[in-house]
Image (cartoon, rainbow, N blue to C red):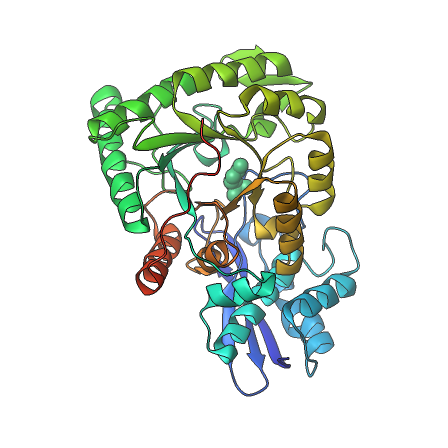
Amino acid sequence: MPTVKRLSGREILDSRGRPTVLATCELEGGITASASVPSGASTGRAEAFELRDGNAKRYRGLGCRRAAANIGAELQGALVGREFDQTGLDQTMIALDGTLAKSRIGANAILAVSVAFARACALSRRVPLYQYFADMMGSSPSTIPRLTINLFSGGKHAGQQVSVQDVLIIPMSAQTVDEALVAAFDVYQAAAELILSKYGMRLLTADEGGLAPPCRTAEEMLGLAVEAIERAGYSPGKDVFLGIDVASTHFYENHKYRLDAEVLDSAEMIQTISRWLDRYPIVSVEDGLAEDDWENWPLLRRTIAGRALTLGDDLLCTNPVRIQRAVEGNACDALLLKVNQIGTLAEALEAYRQARAAGWSITLSVRSGETEDNWAADLAVGWQADQFKNGSIRQSERLAKYNRLLEIEEVTGWPLAAWPRRG
Ligand code: PGA
Ligand code: ZN
C-alpha cells in the first residue's frame, strides 16, 4: 500500500471566482499529484461542511486559507509516514475530524486530499484514474455514462428569472460522447438563435454555461427547449430527450411551492410535474419536491414511475443515512451523486452501493462552482454511473470533463450507457 510522504493545500479560485481548495499529495517514492474540489450554490441542508475563513474583509468571508492550512498542518501531521488504501485514508480523516459534517477540518480540505491521494495512487500503479476508481469498487467498466447536458438555467444558477433550475438535454440516439456533444452543440446554437429572435437577448451564460432565457414559466422554457431541438434538426422524444432539475427546495416555504407566479401544495406540485411529463419528452426529474417534503416523495415517484426517473439531489445529499430513509420509504429511484456533498470517496462509494442495491440508477454530478480539474469524468466512468451531469458545453471547467471523456472514449472505444428506464 502507498505511504503518504507529504501533503500541502492551497486556496485557488473556482468557476464563479470564489475560493476553493487544492491539495497536493506526495507518496513515498516521489509520485506527486494534486486535486481540487468544487462548490455548490443550490446546496442541500445536509451537505458536508465547507470550511471557509469567515473573514468578511476577504472574499466576503468565503476564503479557504484555513481549510488549505489544515491540509499542510493537521492532516499532514496525522497521515505522513503511514500506509493506506483509499478507504483507510478516508476513514482516518473522518475519525480525525470527529464531527458529523466534517466541520472541524473541513469537508473541502478532506475531499481534496482524498482525491489527490487517489490520483497519486493511480500514477504510482501506472493506471488511468478511471481504472483506479473501477478497482476501488471492483467493477470492470465497459460503457461511458450518458450525458445529461444543461441547456437552460433558472433558479439560483441564473438569478431566479424562472423557478426551475435546469432544463437539460439528453442525446438518446447518440452512441458516443462525440455524437452527444455534436447534438448538444447543434441544440445549443439553435436555442441561442431562438432566444435572440424571440427575446432580443444575446448569448449570455449562467453559472454552468447554459443559456438563461427570460422565460416567465417552466413550461415556456420547456417549450423553447423542444423548439430548439426541432430547429437543430433532431426529433424531440426520439433523438433527444429532456431532463429537469426542479431544485424545488429553493422555492419551498411553509409547505408551499412558489413556482413562478403560482403557489402550490405538494399534491399540486406533483400534478404539475406530471403534466410536464405529458407534454414534453422528460425522462428525468431531479428534486421535484423539496428536501424536507419527505412524506410526498413516494407519491411523486409513483406518479412518474415508468415515465421518468425520480432523482434525489438535495433530498439525499449523497448521504448514506438519507439514502437509507429514501430506500425504505420508496421516495426515489435514482441518486444524484455529488462526492463533495459527503466529503470522501469512501463514503460516496457507500452511497453508490446503497443506491445500486436498491436497484436505483445513478447520475454522477459535478457542481455549479467547478475548477479545471477533471477527476469527476474519471469517477463517472470508473464507477459506471448511468448518467453524467456536468453542466453545459461552454466554460473550461465543464469542458475539462467533457474533453477528458473524449480522451477516454478514444482510448477505450466504450459506447455510451443505455438509458436505464424508458418512458
Ligand atoms: P449546485 O447545484 O452545484 O449549485 O449545488 C447543482 C444541482 O442542484 O444539481
Ligand atoms: Zn440539483
Q: How many numbered marks does the figure carry?
A: 0
Task: Please give the name of the residue rendered at 48% of the width and 56% of the height, measured from the top-left corner.
Answer: 376
The residue closer to the viewer here, 138 or 391, is: 138
Residue at 67%, 58% in the rendered image: 106
Q: Is residue 223 above or below residue 358?
A: above
Query: Which quadrant holds residue 84?
Result: bottom right
The spot of residue 151 in percent (x, y) is 35, 35
Relative placement, left or right, of 154 versus 137 is left
Looking at the rendering, which quadrant does residue 418 occupy? Answer: top left
Give left or right: position of 187 versus 318. Answer: left
Quadrant of image for the C terminus = top left
| Residue 321 locus on image (x, y percent) | 74, 43
Q: Quadrant of the N terminus?
A: bottom right
Q: Is residue 22 visible?
A: no
**In x, y percent, where is residue 364?**
51, 47
Outermost residue on the bottom side: it is 29
Q: Position of residue 132 (x, y in %)?
A: 52, 68
The answer to whether one can see residue 412 in this image is yes
Q: Who's the residue at 43% across and 38% down the image?
A: 419
Task: From the viewer's perspective, tell me whether residue 255 is left or right of residue 334.
Answer: right
Q: Nearer the viewer, residue 19 or 382?
A: 382
